[in-house]
Image: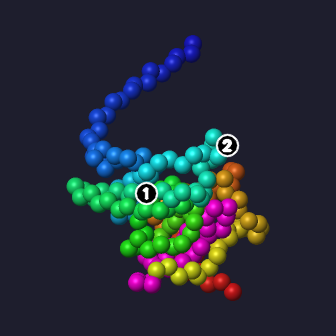
Amino acid sequence: MNRKSKQTTIKHKLQLYADIRAYTDGFEVVSSSIGLDDSLYILLIDRAPEREQGMFVPSRTTYGHTYKVLTLDGDHMEELLLSGQKFNYHFVQPSVEFANPHISGASGFIKQGQAFLFDKGYGKHEQYILTRLKPERGFKEQYTVRFVNEAGEAIKAVDRDFRGDTLLLREDHLIYKLRLYDIAEARYD
């Protein structure tokens, strides 16, 4: 006799954290995320870009867009407008003092202290930039990094996750995990 186990559904009531309606007039929400500083970061755009072939958002547009970044820290909301932007941004995260690393299309980064590892951007997501943030001078590129497996072959990640100081890469059924400390402190000849 085959018995089916009875599954119980749990309803858990969530308390509203924030209502951003007052900040969205004339804008569409692109993404929302929790920063390493535990603040909330909401990216908005004045108008969604048209998709190419009905699927892909172009990396660069002819006309400039206005983005709005909302930063919510407890009960305090800050609003930052970025006008005339011709690149399409997908999310926003804080980097120390909001310095610009000048990497178009980077989809993520990891951070430890003043060291950062960014993916290199559009069409170069298998390459990374190891950089340090210098106070009042911005980012200084140190190395272009390509990750290889034990046989010295380039890792072609099908998905990646950037969290804190850790990068996770998956290549088919193989999982690679890197802490920024490991690469920032390594010596290369």
**Residue 110: x, y in percent?**
50, 67
The residue tagged 1 is 67
Residue occupying image coordinates x 42% and y 46%: 28
Q: Secondary structure at mark 2?
A: loop
Q: Quadrant of residue 103?
A: bottom right
**Residue 157: x, y in percent?**
67, 57
Mark 1, other Cα within 10 Å: few <14 / some 14–19 / many ≥20? many
Q: Is residue 167 left or right of residue 74?
A: right
Q: Secondary structure at mark 1?
A: strand
Q: Is residue 74 left or right of residue 61?
A: left
In the image, residue 82 above or below residue 25 = below
The residue tagged 2 is 53
| Residue 107 appears anywhere in the view | no
Residue type at numbered disc 1: Tyr
- Whether the magenta-drawn stretch holds residue 173 is answered as no
Along the line of sight, the residue nearer the viewer: 113 or 40? 40
| Residue 172 appears anywhere in the view | yes
- Whether the magenta-drawn stretch holds residue 126 is answered as yes
Along the line of sight, the residue nearer the viewer: 21 or 141? 21
Residue type at numbered disc 2: Gln
The part of the chain drawn in magenta is: 112-137
